[in-house]
Structures are given as C-alpha cells and as structure tokens.
Image: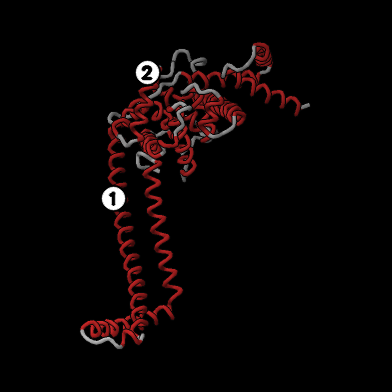
Amino acid sequence: MRELKKCAHDDLSEMMSMALDGLLDPNSLQEVEEHVATCPTCGQKWQSMQRASRLLAASEMPGPPLGFSTRVERELAAGATHRRRVFRGLALLTGSLSMAAMTMAVSVVVGLGIAGWRWLSTQPVVQQESGVISQLISGLGLLGRTASLFLGDLLVHYGVPVALVLGLTLSLLASLWGWLLSRQKTHRNGYA
Amino acid sequence: MGEGMDQERAWIEQALRGDHAAFGQLVRAYERPVYNLTLRMLGDPEEAEDAAQETFLRAYTRLATYEPSRKFVNWLLSIASHYCIDRLRRRIRAPQVSLEDPLPPQWLASEEDRPDRVMTEKQERELVRHILESLPPDYRASIILRYWYDMSYEEIAAATGATESAVKSRLHRARCLMARYLETAATYRGRDARVEEMRA
C-alpha cells in the first residue's frame, strides 16, 4: 500500500513537471490541483517547484564583458597565424623528405647504371676499342666498379631494410601530400 | 526574420571561406545567449567568458560540419553545453552547494513568507546560481535550455545528445531537486528562527 502511494506521488510529481512546461491536458491538470489541495507533501512540493520555476523564468540573460567579440576575433587571427606556421613546417618537412627520397632514387638508378656499365665493359666488343673513348670507358669502368662493389655489398647485406625504408618514405610522402590536398578541398576555412 | 536568416547564412558562407570579420558578426549576434549559458552552467563570470570564447573557437573550427537545417544558435548552444558539462566533470573540487549546507539568511527569504522584505535582484541572482549549482551537469543544462531559451524537449534532446524521454526525466528530477533545495532552505530558516527565539 505504501509502495502504491509512493508510486502515485512519483507519477504526480512527473505531472507537475509537465504542467510547468504547459504540456498537461486540462483533465490531468485538474487531477494535480485536486491532489495537491489534499496532500500536504505534494502541496509543498508543488509550491516549491512553482517558486523555483518562477525564479528561473524571471532571471535575466546577461551578456559578456565589453570587447568579447574583438577578443574572439583576435584569437582566431592568432590561430590562423599558428596554422600557417604549421603548414609551412609541413611543407618544409615534405620538401626535405622529397629531396631525400629523390637522392635515394637517383643513387639506385646510378648504381644500376654503373652495374650495367660494368657488365658492358666485360664484353669483348668494348674491350677491343682504343683511343679516347676507350680510355674514358676504362676510367668510368674503374669508378663504376668501385661504386658497384660498394652498392652491391650494401644491397646484398642490407637490401631488404633499404627497400623497406625507401618504400615507407615514399608512402609517408604520398600520404602527407594527399592529406594536405584533401584538407584544401573539403575545409575551405582551413580547419578540420 | 527571413532577411536575418539570409544575413546569417551569408556570414556563415564567408566565415567558411576564412573571413574572420564575418565570423565576428556571428559572434556579436550570438555572444549574449552563449555567454548566458556558460555563466549559468559554470557560475563564475571569468570561467564563463573563457568557455564562451572556446565555444566560438570550436564553432569556427567545426563550421564545415554545421547543418543549415538546424538553427545556428541552437548549434552554438549545443557546443557550449557539451563543453561546460565536460568542464564541470573535470573539476577536481566541485564547489557545488550541497542540500545539507546551510544558506546565508538573506537567501532564505521568500516572497510568500516575508512580504515586507522582497529579495533584491542580487539576492535572487545568488539564489538562482545556488539552485543551479545544486544540480548535476546534465540536469543543469536541460533546465537552462528550457528556461532561458524556451527550447522544446526535442530541441533540448538535439542540443544535449539525449533522447526526448531522457530530457523529460532530467527536467522532472531537476525540478524535484530544486524544490527540495528550497524546502531545505526553508527548514534552515525555521531552525534559525527558533534559535533566535530561544536566545531572546
């Protein structure tokens, strides 16, 4: 019985809340009014709810201190400067990485070229030639042999890590450029 | 109204292109409702200004995600209320007023019981602040959006990321807490009066 009474009071409390929002139909509102007139607990609660409601409804809406919007604009400008610096840093980073990747790619190409030249120099047709061209080829061949020995050794011992680092660097660069381009397209004010 | 909306839309478009001055117009148009929400939520003017500023900065950075079908001010208030709720939850020592804490006598005067001493505006402001501080952050946000912005349950739900039934429940519980707060205040007032009588 006590539980039932408690439930009835809880339901009524919910109805009071809805009444304060003007969402209660006239019959339910009458039910609330009849109950609070006879139940001191609910009557007190209803009065307190109404008082709190009146206090809040009568409260003003203060504005921020003077110069608030100017401060926000200043913060935005400072943020834009910071963003420009970050973008410059990223551009520098990607530029440096591009240069490094290009250097590595050129080294590989040159290495392959030297290895190719080394192979050519062992061919009888090239060995039988004399004169300036032959001397030049011989000199270049010597240089090529040294370089190819070094590169060959490097690739034999560290071929997998070198290829991995090269691949990773190129992937990172491609992702960075892709990200920068996508930001430029989708977020016109420069923010994510 | 339509002209105002067009103007607002134009400012948003310009701000999306990086025009800070256009966004400044939006700030000027909505600084009062945003600041009021942060002040009511946090209770402290300095913190409220900081939170309002953060709200506008976040709004600028997320402007591309704003859906024009929604009221711009409601979108701003949604950012502000989420930010304030997070901030309140992060407070290490929440200076919330407990229902058990006695109140200074001047806040306990009620217009019903003390018609000769109507509360001053300052006292009312303080009482409102203490009533709000007695509420958990989620309830507080729902009550503020309901009373100061006249939002419907649906709009409050959209602003706070809750369901309509959750909003209805929060408003009900918040009102019960506020009623209890005022009743507790009245109890303390009665006790203090008895102590005064005994001393006399």
- Check contact, mark 2 vs mark 1: CB within 8 A: no
Is residue B105 or residue B126 the one in the foreground?
B126
Q: Position of residue B107 (x, y in %)?
A: 46, 25
Q: Dot 2, crowdedness within 10 Å: few (<14), some or many (≥20)?
A: few
Q: Residue at x 32, y 37 (%)?
A: B18
Q: Residue at x 71, y 23 (%)?
A: A8
**Residue B47 seen in the current view:** no
- The answer for which chain carries disc 2 is B
User: Amino acid type of disc 2?
Assistant: Glu
Cα–Cα span, label 2 and label 1: 39 Å
Q: Quadrant of the C terminus of chain A?
A: top left
Q: Position of residue A89 (x, y in %)?
A: 30, 54
Q: Which element type, helix, strand or loop, lies under badge 2?
A: helix
Q: Which mark is residue B3?
A: 2
**Residue A105 seen in the current view:** yes
Q: Which mark is residue A85?
A: 1
- The answer for which chain carries disc 1 is A
Q: Position of residue B72 (x, y in %)?
A: 43, 28
Q: Position of residue B67 (x, y in %)?
A: 46, 31
Q: Quadrant of residue A35?
A: top right
User: Amino acid type of disc 1?
Assistant: Arg
Q: Is residue B3 left or right of residue A57?
A: left
Please tell me whether residue B155 is drawn above or below residue A72 in the rendered image: above
